[in-house]
Structures are given as structure tokens and as C-alpha cells.
Amino acid sequence: MANGFGSLHVGASGLQGAQNGLNVVANNISNVDTEGYVRQQVLYEDKTYLNFGQAAIAPMAAGIGVAIGDVVHTRDVFLDKAYRSESGRQAFYESNYQAAMEVETMLNENNGTLGTSFATAIADLYEAFSEFSKAPADEVNQNLIVQKADLFISRAQAVYQGLYDYQKNINKKISDDIDRINDLGKTIHELNINIQKIEAGGIETAMDLRDARDSALDELSSLANISYKELPDGIVKVKLEGTDFVIESRAYQIDVLTDGATGFVTPYWPVLSDPSRNDYYEVFDVYNSDPVKNTDIGEVKALLLARGEGKATYLDMLETDFDRNMSVDDYMYTTDSEGNKIKKMMGVDSYESGIANSIMCNEQTELDTLIHDLVVAINNLVSPIKDYTDTTEYEQFSDMTVTYPFQEKRDETTGEVVKDPLTGEVVMEKRDIVPGEITYYDAENNLYLTEGQVRSMIVFDKENSCVGSDFDPHTEEGLPPKELFSRVGCDRYRKVIYSYMEETSETDPETGDPIYELKEGTLYVYNEEGYPRVYDEDEKVFDYEHARYITGVYVPDKERCYTLDSVSVNAEVMDNPSLIAHRHQNDNIAYDLGADIYALWESQDCMLNPADETKCGFAEFYSKMVGELATVGSVYKTTSESLESTKLTINNNRQMVLGVSTDEELQTMIKYQNAYNASSRYINVVSEMIQTIITSMGA
């Protein structure tokens, strides 16, 4: 046991410990509203013991007071990890829900304002065709169709552009989030270094720096899927999406690859990539967002998923890429078990693991599909088409050989084949066709067609076509009739001129052989959607304009497709609505045409997407599209709200540990005040005792 003056030292340590405890409580109360502040708590320990004797089994010692072992911030690592996990998951579903809500707002289906929703534009066009079916030759009805068709396309394009604009907003948010992730990585690394410096001596805990680092981890967990581990030296190592992000020596930065066409960014790890080889290691596996695998975490992944990879069209629903060996019609369509032509959509698995996961791209694709299918169906009625192999012309020329009117050029003297001195390729020259041959010359593309190309042609169906007001039955001017909807990249038809030698009734007076004369005719060939016109440097083809072989094959051109970016109401029809086909070629009013167009709305030929097994009509298509969006949005909303509730519960439990409660701190303050008073009274008693002893000895 301590002597008299040693007892004073014990009391003094109690005063000092209580005073420090009061200071910590005061600091807690002053930071009760400080964001990210964690309640501090004093941990006491015994001071060094003094040995004053030896017992049978251990030395006898006396304590000389109390000391502060450490001042720590109170955290529960398990609650921290649970909170950060739920925070990232909640951010993922909340971001997707916000995207779904934005689409609903663009479609104006969440308030149903009369006259502004896209559904109204569809209904108005339907009503216009209803009136047209009753009186196709009525100028009022013709004008109504043009007006409503223009409003329909304008409204659809406004929605489509709105979706794209929101994609760009999401893209900007992604860029900002990546910048913030990089900043947080730098912050965590700098805090790691500073914490290590302060705590290296084992004397002090860098509580404020640790609080700042924990706040950075909290924010980072909402942006991406992270895991972390604190090392014995106080360094926290962080992995982001399974890849090292913050290590002992540095914080790796994330860079973005920007698409030149759309401006969309893709985050990648520069340290794991080789841009010189176009090899980029992407940070986020966007299409791996499975709650079972715990990969549905992080705002950035959700934004990348919602935004998609670009501006989608109906082509993104199709099954296969363009093949040079198939016609564009074969590329887009197939036949069902009953022989009906149907769109060739991708498989359900490909759809559900791909574009279906992107709210923006899926809605763009379905909207573009609706417009495309309706526009093509109407155009095919007002300006009908059919396979060339089903025409009388093809039947007439079926025993003729489709040929190129070119041959190898030969030297007039030697008879040898002439070659280009620069390329070494054989020089070709034009020749006359002979009886039994037929050529097909594509005037627009300045080339002669092969037999395979001829067989795959789709041509204007003159026999079943109605006409507009510009039709002249004597000259057949006004054929083909104008399509209602046109494309930016091309007209509906291109001219293909066929040439052949026809036997006349005359004979050659010298040989007695029949005399042939050159005959020509014109086909109006339908410019199939995406009709090839751009070269791909993989295959040699013949350039008829310059009579030589060149490298390249044609690939599809989206400007030649009926997409929302390229479709509009035909300008000629806009100026003169009477050009719309409304009469038969015998001048009878085409009531049947009006009825056929009106019946389109009820025909059950449409499919919303590859996962939709039930066909529907145009009247139902939009309702199904909105219903699907509402279902997806409801799922995201319900999940987000559930996770928000879970996150709030965990955070409340966490705040009970790390948060500052004024009531609790006041109770602790009273405890330290009482301890301080007790230490003071102890010192007074010891002081009086010593005073008494000294006085008694002096006496």
C-alpha cells in the first residue's frame, strides 16, 4: 500500500483521469451534430505497481493510481460491413428505379395529361385511319392522315430523343461518380499514411483521421462493390469490384474510354490495360448483376446498366449480324410454321442477359420496334411490294442467263490478256450481250447484278397497287405511288434496268438467221432496309464503273432503315396529301385499301420483345410496353424501399454504438464529476491525515 505522499499521488491520478474523461464528454457533446463524427470513449488502466514484499506465491504490490490507456471511437465492425453492403445494394436498385420513373415521365403515362401522352398520339392516328377507311378519296381525311402521322412521328421522335438525352445525363453522372471514386481512393490512401504515422509510436490513436476514413468507405460503398481489410499497422486495403484499389503504397486510379460516336464512357483499369492494342480491362462486369451472387451492388454499375451501350434501335432485337450471303430481307425476317413472314428476333437467353437489363436501351428498342413495324406495314399497303421471283417478268426471263456484259481485254496484236501495269490485275472491257443472256443494271449503285441478287430482289407490285392523284393511266406516270413514311438515306425504290436480245420476225438475208434487237425494261426495286452501300475491307468485288476488281463488300446502313432517327412523313405527301394512294388504277375508290390499313391496328402480328410469347396488334403493343415498364419500375421501387428500410435499421443500430446521445453523455459527465469529487475528497482526507501526523510528531 502506498505511503502518505504516495496516496496523494493516487488521488491526483484520479483527479487527472476524471478531468480527461470530462474533456472527452465535452468533445462528444460539442460534436453531436457533426456529420461523420464517432463518439469517443475513455479506456482506463492501472499505473505501474510498486512491489513492497514477497508472498508465498507472488510478490506483494501496491498500485500508485489510474491512467488513461486510450481514447477510442466506438464502432462495431460487423454493423459497418452490413451497412456498407446494404447501402451499395440500395443505391443499385434506387438508380434503376429513377431511370424507370424518368421513362414514364417522358411517355407522360404517370399523370395521363390529355393530349400530351404518347398514347394520345397513337389513338389520334388510329382515329385518322378509321375516318380514311370510310372515305379514302375525301381530301379532309387525306389531310387528317398526314397531320396525325406527322404528329405521331414527331411525338415518338421527341420521346426517343428524350431517352437519348437522359442516357447522356446518366453518362455525365457516371463520369462524375468515377471522378468521385478516384478522389475517395486518394483520400483513403492519404489517411492511411497519416494514421500510420500518428499511431506508429503506439501512444496515440488517430481518431479523427479514422472517422474521416470510415466516412470515405461509407460513401465509396454506395458507388461500387467494395471489400476491405485493416492491417495491424493501421493501413486499410480496399478492393473495388474484386480488383485492388487501395494498397499500402498507392491508390490505383480508374480511367474512362469514351466512345467517339455517342460520347458514352466505359470505366477501365489503366494498370491492367494496354490501349496500344485496344485491350481494356473494364472495371464493372455490367451484365453480371445477380442478387444470388451478391453482384447487384453499386450506383455506378446500375447507371451503366440503365444507360446501356448506345442509342438502341429495333435492329438490336434481331438475331444475327449482317451476312453478305443473305439478302437484307432474309437478315431481318423468317417464316413461322404457317409460312407467314415474321421478324427474326434474337433468342430469349440473349435478350434477357443483354439488352433487357438496360431500361433505356430496352425502351428505345421497343419504341423503335413499334414505330418501325407500323410504318413498314402502312407503306407496304399504300405502295405494295413482292418478291421478284413471283412476278411475270421473272417467269418470262427464267430460261435466260443472268450475265455481266464484261470480258477480259486482250491485246489486238498478241491476243494476250491485258493486265493493269500498277496492280497486275486483269483489265475488263464491256461487251455486247448475246441471245439467251439478260443483264440487270442497278442505276443508283452503278453496278450489274448477279443471278443471286436478282432472285433476292423485292420489287414494286404493280398489279395490286392503288394510286394517288398524280396517276396517269395512259403513261402510267404516278407509279409507283408515294409511300406515306420515308427514310433519310434513300427513296423507297431504285431503278434496275434489264436488257436482253429479242428475236424479231426478220431474218438475215445472207445467213437466214433470225435478227435480234436489244430490248430494255425498268423494274422498281424496293430499297430493302439497311440496303448495303458501305464497304468492308474483307472481300474483293467487281467495280463495274471502272471495270476492275476492288476490295470491299457492302454492309448495312442504318440511315436506310425505318428507325426513329431516319423516318419522317414523305415530304411530297406533306405538300400534297392527295398523293396518298386512294383509288384503284381503274379509278374506283379504294375502300378495300382503307379497310386494310384500318385492320392493321387489330392484326395480331407484333411481338414486344423476344421474351414476349404472346403476339399482339399495334393497338395493344404500346399498352404492353408501358405495362412492362410499370412492372419493372415497381420491382425496382419495392426492392429499393425494402433495402432502404433494412439500411435504416442497420444504421440506427450502428448509431446506437457510434452516435452521440446527449442524455447518455450527460449521465457519463455526472459519473466523471462524481469521480472527480471523490478523488478531491480522498486527497483532502489524505492531506488532513498527513497534517495530523506531522503536527503530532512536532508536539
Image (cartoon, rainbow, N blue to C red):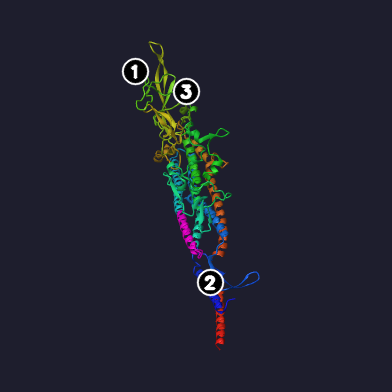
SS class, disc 3: helix
User: In the depicted view, which residue is nearer to us: 303 or 181?
Assistant: 181
The Cα atoms of the two marked residues, 3 and 1, are separated by: 38 Å
Residue labelled with disc 3: 396
The Cα atoms of the two marked residues, 3 and 2, are separated by: 107 Å
* Quadrant (top left, top right, bottom left, bottom right) of the C terminus: bottom right
Say whether residue 616 is visible: no
Label 3: how many residues lie within 10 Å, few (<14), some (14-19) or many (20+)?
few
In front of the other: label 3 or label 1? 1
Considering every residue shown, the one lying at the far right of the view is 56
Disc 3 marks a residue whose amino acid type is Gln
Question: In the image, which residues are magenta?
Answer: 180-209
User: In the depicted view, which residue is nearer to us: 200 or 109?
Assistant: 200
Residue labelled with disc 2: 21
| Image location of residue 136, percent across then percent down | 47, 38
Q: Earlier in the sequence, mark 3 or mark 1?
A: 3
Residue labelled with disc 1: 412
